[in-house]
Structures are given as structure tokens and as C-alpha cells.
Amino acid sequence: MFQKVLIANRGEIALRILRACKELGIQTVAVHSTADANAMHVRLADESVCIGPNAAKDSYLNIPAIMAACEITGADAVHPGYGFLSENARFAKILTEHNVTFIGPSAHHIEIMGDKITAKKTAVELGIPVVPGSAGAVETEQQAIKTAKEIGYPVLIKATAGGGGRGMKVAKTESELLVAWSTARTEAKAAFGNDSVYMEKYLGKPRHIEVQVMGDGQGNAVHLGVRDCSLQRRHQKVWEEAGGPTILPEERDEIGEICAAAMRKLKYSGAGTVEFLYENGEFYFIEMNTRLQVEHPVTERITGIDIVYEQIRVASGEKLSMTQDQVQFYGHAIEVRINAEDPQTFAPSPGTITFYHPAGGVGVRVDSAVYQGYKIPPYYDSLIGKLIVYGRNREECLQRLRRAVDEFVIDGIKTTLPLFQRLMKEPDILAGNYDIHWLEKYLAENK
Ligand code: ADP
């Protein structure tokens, strides 16, 4: 096992990783920007190193500074968390070259899944169902027309280098196709410096369903069930659920086993998430994230498995601590993301927290790094905490969530907590009846 882990992240996830290290008896090193000198992860770590000024590109993305921090402290492994350098293959390579373990998959697996076309090709080779579409880039008008005919309208044109849902265009008919195709190329060129696009069947009312996988790089892999993350705003997840009635246990086991088998074939190491759109009982692969995900606690809650603990174990060379039949699912869990944002306009709301009282009681978990008197800096993303609630079934979970949201007090800044109070009055939310467009539509109609 590792002696000392450097946590290359900040906020709630840095604290989450630090807690797992403490439980495993591993020394911790926090790295931080100047703005984060008083952050909770810095206060609780055994050692800390300032790695640069406020801007993330000069600190949390500064590979030489992080390498120097490893050297100075003698850390033998780095946990990247999510965001920042977590899916940076070059960072994983450099660490390995310096005999520091990257707690995550191989640089090769990060690279394959980081490119949309190779990711989709790999998914097909591994037997994962994908959205019907072009085999690769669509380069001519004739090819665009032919491909659209084959897959059927409406079609979606997507930038190969795309990210965050940018550079996508829908065409409902052949007359819309050529304009959509050339606009998508122009926009892709402007946004990503690369005008390569590909095509997919456009799904009208899908849900976002993702499978949590874990592998040990030795050919063992399991799935930990699915999460429904359909409630999104601007492609950012807002509310995530695990367990419960949306996906039947048989469907969960079937798609889960397909993903676990794929990870066994790849000899994948660490945690990963295979993301799908789900419509009319069918799953369609959209991408794979080769890292720990923000919403991992809902899966931990319904399986009792500590995903960060497993990541650290397998990175140190141990086998997975469980087999698929030892993975059991209990009840239902919901996570809501507490952002320092105006709950109506979603404008960022940094500043000082003048009063802080987190929710507690039965079935409640709060992952956050803020405290009373903490000043939220304006330089990073606005997620300040996650409220995770458990119930034996979805109804009980919702009752508890309502109670916990009412109990939570954060004064001095605006947060998204009032949005959740509103959502829990909506019949569609109570019934679990929503797709990936539901929240945007609701927000547009209820200003
Ligand atoms: P990005 O990397 O830009 O986020 P994704 O492929 O993950 O691109 O797609 C982003 C979002 O666009 C998805 O979460 C989904 O909401 C929507 N989307 C992607 N592909 C399709 C499709 N074939 N049909 C309908 N919606 C889609």
C-alpha cells in the first residue's frame, strides 16, 4: 500500500479523497492555489504545498508544480479527483515515468476514451451498444446525405473534437441537412480549431443513464449498477439517482454485465463510467469517463462500496476486493448538487458563508468542504457541496430529501437549494417522469 498520497484537486472531492486515505492509514499531501490557502482540504491534510496563483491553469493544472510537490514531499501516488488533470493522459504518463503512481486507468485507456471517434469504435468492438451513425468523420455533402438516409431522420451532427455539448446541430429533413452540416463544421472550426464532424441518429426524449464500473487492471472487473442523471441544465448534471424504478433490475444487470465484460477485455484499471442515452428500452453509448465522477456517492450508498477506497487499492496493485455476485443493491439514493449560484438565473455567487448548518439525521450524507466563515473564491466551479439522501424506496428517499433540503442553511451567498424545494413540488419529479430536456423546459416556462 502507498505511504503518502498527493491529492491534485480542491473542494469537496479533495476532502472525499483525504477521508479515504485517512481510513487506510495513508499520509496525505494537499496542494493548493494561493486563493485556497485556508481551504478545508489544506487544513486537514498532513502536509500542504502551494502550487501557484489563483487561476487553475497556473495551479491545479500546473503539471511541473505538481511534480515538484511530489518530489519535495516524497508522495508515492497522486489522486487526481475529477476535472482538472483527471483525464489528462500526459499527466498520467509523466507521473509513471517518475515512479509516482497515477490513481486511475492507464494513459492508453484515457487516450482512447478521450477521443469521440476512437471511443465509439472501441465501444463497438467491445460489444457495447452505440447510437446508430456514421462510421467516422463525414467529409463530403454526398456522404452526409447518404449517411442520413441510412440512419434515418432526425439526425444529429456532432464535432469530433466537441465537448460540453458544443458544436451539435439537429437536422429533421434532407432540406435542413446541408445547412446544418456546414454550420456545424464552421462552428466546430471556430470553437475547437478542427472542422471534423460525424453523424448520429437524434434521440428525441432520452434519459441519461450511466453504468459505474471498477477494474483492477488484471482482468477483473465489476459493475456497480446504474445512475439516472437526466436532470441537467446546459449539459451539467443537477440531480442524480441510483436504484429504484426507472431501470428494471434485469435491464441494469444486462447493461452492467456488458460494460463489466468490456472492462475485463480491456484490462481496465480503476473507476470508470460508461454513459448512455436510454430511450424505448434501448441503451446507446455516448461516452466513457475514465475517472471518479461527482455523483459516485449515490452508488456508494446503494451498494455499501467505497469507490475511492477501491481506486486506491487497485492502483497499489491489489485485486478488486469483490466479485460481481458480492455486489448487492439496496434501496434508492438521490444526490442534489449545491452550487454557489442564484437559483433563478444561475449566475455565480461567490462570497463569505456567514452561517452554515448542514442537514443531518437518518439516511443523510453531506460531502462538502465549506464551513462557517469560509470565503468561496470566484476562480473555480461553483459546486460547494452535495447532499446525498437514502431511502428503502424512491418515495422514502424523496420524503427524506425534502426534509433535508428544508433543514440545510447556508447564509451569506445564494445557492441552488431553493431550486430543489421547487422541484420537489413538481408531479413529474415525484413520479420520476423526466428526460434530458425536462429541466431546461421547466426553467424556461417557470422564470
Ligand atoms: P459532449 O462531449 O459535447 O458533452 P456528448 O456526446 O456527451 O458530447 O453529448 C452531450 C449531450 O448531447 C448528451 O448528454 C445528450 O444530452 C445530447 N446528445 C448527444 N448525442 C445525442 C443523440 N444522438 N441524440 C440526442 N441527444 C444527444
Image (cartoon, rainbow, N blue to C red):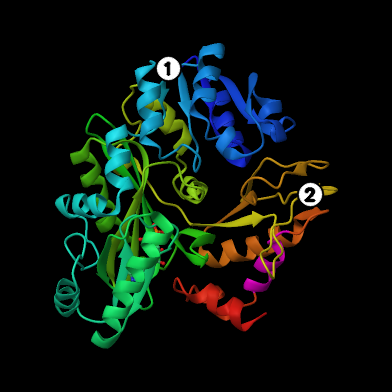
The front one of 254 and 139 is 139
Whether ligand 1 has any atom under 8 Å from the Cβ at mark 1 is answered as no
Q: Is residue 316 visible?
A: no
Helix, strand or loop at label 1? It is: loop
In the visual, does 248 lie left or right of 309? left
Q: Quadrant of ligand 1?
A: bottom left
Q: Residue at x 51, y 67 (%)?
A: 231
**Considering only vertical position in the picture, is 306 above or below 177?**
above
Q: Residue at x 17, y 49 (%)?
A: 126
Name the kind of residue labelled 1 in the image: Met
The front one of 321 and 316 is 316
Q: Residue at x 26, y 69 (%)?
A: 200
In the picture of the structure, the residue carrying the numbered disc 1 is 1
In the visual, does 164 lie left or right of 323? right
Where residue 199 sits: x, y (%)?
Answer: 25, 68
- Split into 4 quadrants, where in the image is the C terminus? bottom right
Distance of mark 2 from mark 1, alpha carbons? 40 Å
Where residue 296 sits: x, y (%)?
Answer: 48, 47
- Which residue range is magenta in the image? 415-424
- Split into 4 quadrants, where in the image is the N terminus? top left
Q: Which of the 4 image quadrants contains residue 137?
A: bottom left
In the picture of the structure, the residue carrying the numbered disc 2 is 351
